[in-house]
Amino acid sequence: MKALLLVDIQNDFCPGGALEVKEGDQVVPIANQLMEHFDLVVATKDWHPANHGSFAANHLWRYPGQTIELDGLEQILWPIHCVQDSFGALLVKTLNTEKIEKIFQKGTDPNIDSYSGFFDNAHRKATGLGNFLKDKGVEEIYVMGLAQDYCVKYTILDALELGFKTYLIADGTRAVNLNPEDGDNAIKEMKAKGAIVINSNSLTK
Ligand code: VGL
Ligand code: ZN
């Protein structure tokens, strides 16, 4: 069984959002199209409390892009984004949610960030996504969404570690690119760890 995993297709990661990803909204029509080709569709949401430690604004004199130590882990500081129940945390309105069977929230603990949809950044706690997919008999996961160089990348690396055959739908992702080559490097790293990189048209034709 194969599943489509939609990562963080939320307002704050789209143009005009708090942590906007260039062309982030362009993944939405691809997601809507691909859903029809899967038996199981699941999604993740970045879902932070307002006091989250990844927000620069929660640390005196710090600004987005700086790195701090948060509960023993290196942490990049971000603008305030995807605050629970805020507009920015909503799935993009044009995303068809009818086929999404379950949504997994991550980044809810103020003391640790969670780029991956499976575990927090220290692998201290699971979100439940891994067991959910295994219980459903999923063996292959197709991943797309935002952002290519953070949440998509770490979700894919964890999926591979958990033993899933894992595909990156490259045209269904866009990168934050704090450094201009981050997106490309992320793709190289995912490939090197065993991800299979495809484009959406190989699933729809
Ligand atoms: C993300 C940075 C901070 C993402 C989430 O969804 O890629 N990036 N929080
Ligand atoms: Zn976040």
Image (spheres, rainbow, N blue to C red):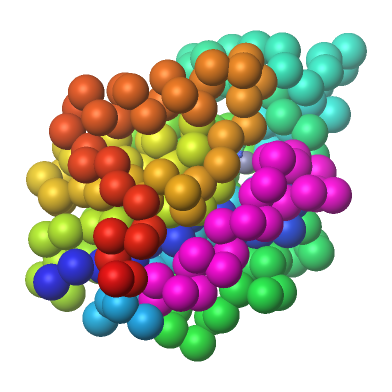
Is residue 2 rendered to the left or right of residue 81?
left
Q: Nearer the viewer, residue 138 or 50?
A: 138
Please tell me whether residue 170 belongs to the stretch shown in magenta: no
Is residue 73 rendered to the left or right of residue 101?
right
Q: Position of residue 32 (x, y in %)?
A: 50, 74
Which residues, given as a range, are shown in magenta? Answer: 14-35
Numbered marks: total: 0
Q: Nearer the viewer, residue 27 or 133?
A: 27
Q: Nearer the viewer, residue 78 or 39?
A: 39
Q: Position of residue 155 (x, y in %)?
A: 36, 43
Is residue 202 positioned above or below 116 on the image? below
Q: Residue at position x 63%, y 56% from top? A: 26
Is residue 186 positioned above or below 169 on the image? above
| Residue 74 visible | yes
Q: Residue furthest bottom?
A: 98
Q: Position of residue 127 (x, y in %)?
A: 38, 54
Q: Residue at position x 62%, y 15% from top? A: 179
Is residue 122 positioned above or below 127 on the image? above
| Residue 84 visible | no
Q: Quadrant of residue 52?
A: top right
Q: Position of residue 105 (x, y in %)?
A: 51, 59
Q: Quadrant where the N terminus lies?
A: bottom left
Is residue 36 rendered to the left or right of residue 131?
right
Ligand 1, what quadrant?
top right
